[in-house]
Image (spheres, rainbow, N blue to C red):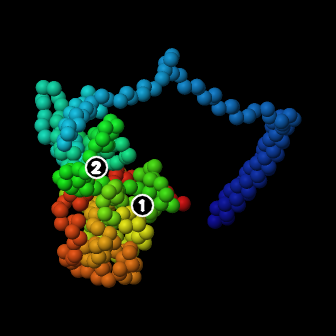
C-alpha cells in the first residue's frame, strides 16, 4: 500500500514539473513572436502616400458611317388619277398605292366610304365611280368656281392573323373644280327679261357651307387639329344671291370615323330637326350661339374621340336646310341647346318643347316644298382630336 502511494506521488510531481516547463516555453515563444511581429510592422510602414488611382474609362468611339451616307427620303407615289365629268367622277388607284411594291387589299381602300366599283387584275388598278354629290363629297364655293372634294381613304388591315401593321392610314383629297357661270355682255342690246324656266332654275341653286372657325368666329380655322375638351366651332351658312331672305337650320349632325354616316361607331349629337343633344347626354358645354343673321348659324361642340380608337380622327356630317326667313320658328325650324333646360337660338324657346320626344313635320315654308334641292348634306373632316398632355 505504501509503495502504491509513493508511485502516485512520484507521477503527480512529474506531471507538475512537465506542465511548468511547458508554460515557461509558451511564454518565451510568445515573446519571440511578438518581437518578430514588431519587426515585421516596422518593415511595412508607409513613408510616402500611394500614387495609385482608378484608371480612366476608355474613350467612346465615334460612330462610323459609310462615306457619303445620307438617309433616303421617300418619294411620293404617282398612284392615283381622277377624271371629273359633268356630273360624276372616276378615280383610278394603283394597287401599289404606297409605291413600295406591295399591293393593298381592295377592301382597305374606299372613296368617301364607298367601295371600289371595279378592278383590272392585269393592270393592277382599282376603279371608283361616284356622282358629284355622292360618296361623302364636300362642296366648296368661291367667287368664280366651286369644288367637289372627295376623300380617298386607305385603312390597312392587320397582317394575316397577327395584330400588327406595317403600313399606316392614308387619306388623299380628290378635287373636281368647275367654273361658275357668269353673264357676259358683248355690248349689244339684250332683253332684260329671261324665260321663267331659266329664272326658276337660277333661284333654286342654293349654296351651303359648313366651316370650322377660329375662337373669335372671325375667320375660317386654318387647322383641324384639336385637343380633347377644346371647343370645335362650326359655322353653317347659305348664300343669299337673288333669293328672298333665307334662314338656315341644321337638322342633324353625326360623327363617324370615316365620312359615311352609315358606319359604326357613330355619334348623333344633333338631331330631331335641330336639337343639340351633346350637352344633355355628356354634360358638355356644347351649344348653339344666339342667332344674329338668318342665313348664318353658329354652334360649338366639345372635342371628343371614339372609345378604343387611337387615331383621334373624326368626320362630322351635317344635314342643313334653308327656309324662308319669314317662316315661323317651330318644331322643324329651330336651333335648340340644352343647359338646365332647352333654349332656342332665335329666342323662340317653346319650339324646343319636342326635343325630349319626337318633333313632327311642323309648318313648312313654301320654299321648302320644292323638295330636297333646299337641303344639303356636308362633311367636315378629317378632324384630328389629340389627347390632352399630362401635366
Q: Which residue is farthest top? A: 67
Q: Which residue is farthest front? A: 189
Q: Please state the horizontal and vertical placement of residue 142, each as a whole percent of the image.
A: 37, 46
Q: Please state the horizontal and vertical placement of residue 179, each as a whole percent of the image.
A: 31, 40
Q: Nearer the viewer, residue 297 or 260?
A: 297
Res. 193 visible in picture = yes
Identify the element where label 2 is drawn: loop
Does label 1 or label 2 sit earlier along the sequence?
Answer: 2
> Horizontal placement of 166 versus 108: left or right?
right
Please give the count of numbered marks on the rendered protein: 2
**The N terminus appears in which quarter of the rendering?**
bottom right
Relative to 185, residue 285 above or below: below
**The C terminus appears in which quarter of the rendering?**
bottom right
Q: Residue at x 19, y 42 (%)?
A: 87
Identify the element where label 1 is drawn: strand
Q: Nearer the viewer, residue 14 or 5?
A: 14
Check residue 232 in the rendering and tell me which mark sits there, or answer none.
1
For mark 2, does the 10 Å Cα neighbourhood hold few (<14), some (14 to 19), or many (20 or more) residues? few
Q: Nearer the viewer, residue 43 or 319?
A: 319
Q: Residue at x 26, y 80 (%)?
A: 354
Q: Please state the horizontal and vertical placement of residue 125, each as a whole percent of the image.
A: 18, 31
For mark 1, does the 10 Å Cα neighbourhood hold few (<14), some (14 to 19), or many (20 or more) residues? many
Check residue 8 in the rendering and tell me which mark sits there, or answer none.
none
Check residue 192 in the rendering and tell me which mark sits there, or answer none.
2
Q: Nearer the viewer, residue 68 or 30?
A: 68
Relative to 3, residue 50 above or below: above
Amino acid at each position: 500500500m505504501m509503495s502504491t502511494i509513493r508511485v502516485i506521488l512520484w507521477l503527480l510531481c512529474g506531471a507538475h514539473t512537465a506542465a511548468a516547463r511547458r508554460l515557461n516555453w509558451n511564454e518565451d515563444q510568445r515573446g519571440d513572436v511578438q518581437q518578430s511581429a514588431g519587426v515585421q510592422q516596422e518593415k511595412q510602414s508607409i513613408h510616402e502616400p500611394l500614387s495609385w488611382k482608378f484608371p480612366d474609362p476608355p474613350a467612346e468611339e465615334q460612330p462610323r458611317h459609310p462615306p457619303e451616307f445620307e438617309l433616303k427620303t421617300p418619294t411620293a407615289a404617282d398612284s392615283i388619277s381622277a377624271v371629273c365629268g359633268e356630273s360624276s367622277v372616276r378615280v383610278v388607284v394603283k394597287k401599289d398605292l404606297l409605291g413600295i411594291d406591295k399591293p393593298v387589299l381592295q377592301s382597305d381602300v374606299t372613296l368617301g366610304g364607298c367601295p371600289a366599283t371595279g378592278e383590272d387584275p392585269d393592270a393592277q388598278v382599282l376603279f371608283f365611280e361616284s356622282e358629284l354629290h355622292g360618296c361623302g363629297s364636300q362642296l366648296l364655293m368661291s367667287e368664280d368656281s366651286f369644288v367637289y372634294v372627295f376623300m380617298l381613304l386607305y385603312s390597312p388591315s392587320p397582317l394575316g392573323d397577327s395584330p400588327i401593321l406595317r403600313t399606316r392610314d392614308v387619306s388623299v383629297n380628290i378635287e373636281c373644280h368647275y367654273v361658275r357661270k357668269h353673264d357676259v355682255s358683248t355690248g349689244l342690246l339684250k332683253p332684260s327679261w329671261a324665260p321663267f324656266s331659266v329664272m326658276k332654275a337660277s333661284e333654286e341653286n342654293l349654296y351651303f357651307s359648313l366651316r370650322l372657325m377660329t375662337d373669335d368666329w372671325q375667320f375660317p380655322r386654318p387647322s383641324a387639329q384639336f385637343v380633347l375638351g377644346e371647343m370645335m366651332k362650326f359655322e353653317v351658312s347659305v348664300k343669299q344671291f337673288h333669293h328672298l331672305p333665307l334662314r338656315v337650320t341644321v337638322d342633324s349632325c353625326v360623327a363617324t370615323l370615316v365620312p359615311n354616316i352609315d358606319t359604326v361607331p357613330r355619334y348623333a349629337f344633333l338631331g330631331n330637326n335641330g336639337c343639340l343633344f351633346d350637352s344633355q347626354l355628356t354634360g358638355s358645354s356644347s351649344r348653339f350661339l344666339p342667332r344674329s343673321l338668318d342665313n348664318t348659324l353658329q354652334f360649338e361642340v366639345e372635342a371628343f374621340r371614339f372609345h378604343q380608337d387611337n387615331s383621334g380622327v373624326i368626320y362630322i356630317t351635317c344635314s342643313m336646310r334653308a327656309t324662308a326667313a319669314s317662316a315661323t320658328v317651330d318644331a322643324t325650324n329651330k336651333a335648340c341647346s340644352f343647359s338646365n333646360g332647352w333654349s332656342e337660338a332665335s329666342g323662340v324657346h317653346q319650339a324646343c318643347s319636342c326635343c325630349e320626344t319626337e318633333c313632327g313635320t311642323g309648318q313648312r315654308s313654301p320654299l321648302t316644298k320644292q323638295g330636297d334641292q333646299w337641303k344639303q348634306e356636308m362633311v367636315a373632316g378629317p378632324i384630328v382630336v389629340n389627347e390632352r398632355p399630362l401635366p
